[in-house]
Amino acid sequence: MTKTVDLISPIDGSVYLTREVLTRDAAFDAAKRAKAAQADWAARPVSERIALVRKAGEIIGQQTDRMATELAHQMGRPIRYGGEYGGFNERLTYMADVAEDSLAPMQIEDSDAFRRVIKRTPWGTVLVIAPWNYPYMTAINTVAPALIAGNTVILKHAGQTLAVGEHLAEAFRAAGLPEDVFQNLVLDHDTTSALLSERAVDFVNFTGSVGGGRSMERAAAGTFIPVSTELGGKDPGYVRADANIDAAVDTLLDGAMFNAGQCCCGIERIYVHESLFDQFVEKAVAWVNAQKLGNPLDPDTTMGPMANVRFAKEVRAQIEEALADGATAHIDTMPADDGGAYLTPQILTNVTHKMRVMRDESFGPVVGIMPVKDDEEAIALMNDSQFGLTASIWSADIATAEALGDRIETGTVFLNRCDYLDPALCWTGCKDTGRGQGLSKLAYQALTHPKSYHLKKA
């Protein structure tokens, strides 16, 4: 019996598309073909691989209307934001720009007696398991450098954004990549795990839940396949007494609410110096009340539905539990809130770390705000989390902010900004966020392994 997956649009709960899931045999055949194609692909000059990846990016750039419309239907992002091409192109372009230098051999000696050099060698076939929340940008983070480094790539995209994988495959094919060098496959969990446990691939990059990351590590256990993970967060913002409060409100609330709060590095908890707390909350409530929740195909909509009713159900549960435990909600239910995927964004005060909304990943449009008396209390609260992806500090004192950042258990420290991936900086995390190493020159180290040459000259 053929197994299928239905992509349910959050706009109206209808089936947006249906795709057949690849059988185990077909998936293993695809992996075999990827392995067979890898040597020839890696033998091409790096400049040629770069040019082909850039060309695919240019093709996507000619289809941004398609990108925006399909994203609205698949995961609810309003069309007013125009898709993801800006960030997609920024990341692809930077990784292409630094590739030749990043992949260049490290020469130790080239004398009359010896040539000693360390070269970067592609792993082989890289399996990229991409999430639905930023489906183009998260995929290209690994797809572009993996291909440029000489790996072949198999992309398994989330069931909520299947059309994104198909769009990327079309673009790479149109750019001239051989068919087996980049493959977009619709796989179930069991087959995906089998590809790892039976070493049908050589490297896996997974972005998703902590539970999903654990499943990847279990599947790869004993195979020595590198497992790169980015498993979300509970990212804090800290507003010091010397902060620009208007800039802090605008940026932190955008970081908390954009994409209906469905951001790995979105702001999920805010700590404000007690001298600014009341003013910050007042401005934050005004900011959220200015948003328009509605159909993402309406150009006036600033916040669409969550990608799936079950995601909204979890956020509602966290809010209701917090209210039952004494939290205060500041936003009245918006007209478009249907009790399903369309969810009113919410600000909570009188929250504590005993509440799930301040501990568990919400991944939705809710943020708790707490007053703090000083830096020490703020650091203690920011570090009181199982996650460690990003942290955002707001201050006019860059030296103090950097010193505070040294003490925060996180992968990235922001000052006076948040919710942004700088492609020149390593995208990584700690604790239950996982141990990925994406973007920057370091991504090329992760996507290749060193090979040493100690050559004695005759």
Image: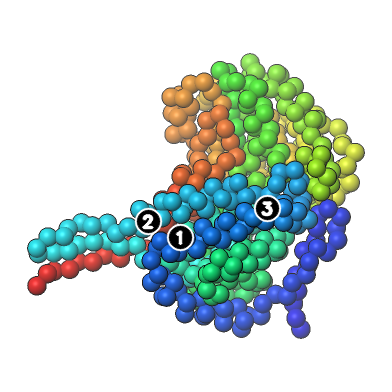
Q: Could you tell me residue 181's position as x and y percent?
A: 51, 72
Instruction: Specify the quadrant that holds the N terminus.
Output: bottom right
Q: Is residue 424 visible?
A: yes
Between residue 119 and residue 181, name the one nearer to us: 181
Instruction: Specify the quadrant that holds the C terminus.
Output: bottom left
Task: Identify whether 231 is placed above or below 287.
Answer: below
User: Could you tell me if the residues under marks 3 and 1 are in contact, i.e. CB atoms within 8 Å?
Assistant: no
- Residue 64 marker: 3
Residue at screen point 78% across, 56% down:
73
Query: Colour scheme used in the picture?
Result: rainbow
Q: Amino acid at mark 2?
A: Glu
Distance between the alpha carbons at the discs numbered 1 and 2: 9 Å
Using the rendered view, name the quadrant where residue 100 is placed: bottom left
- Residue 50 marker: 1
Distance between the alpha carbons at the discs numbered 3 and 1: 22 Å
Q: Could you tell me residue 168's position as x and y percent?
A: 62, 63
Mark sitting earlier along the chain (2/3): 3
Q: Please name the residue that numbered disc 2 is placed on.
A: 100
- Residue 107 marker: none
Mark sitting earlier along the chain (3/1): 1
User: Could you tell me if the residues under marks 1 and 2 are in contact, i.e. CB atoms within 8 Å?
Assistant: yes
Task: Identify whether 12 is placed above or below 193.
Answer: above
Left or right: 196, with 19 as reference point: left
As helix, strand or loop, the secondary structure at mark 2 comes to helix
Task: Identify whether 439 is placed above or below 283.
Answer: below
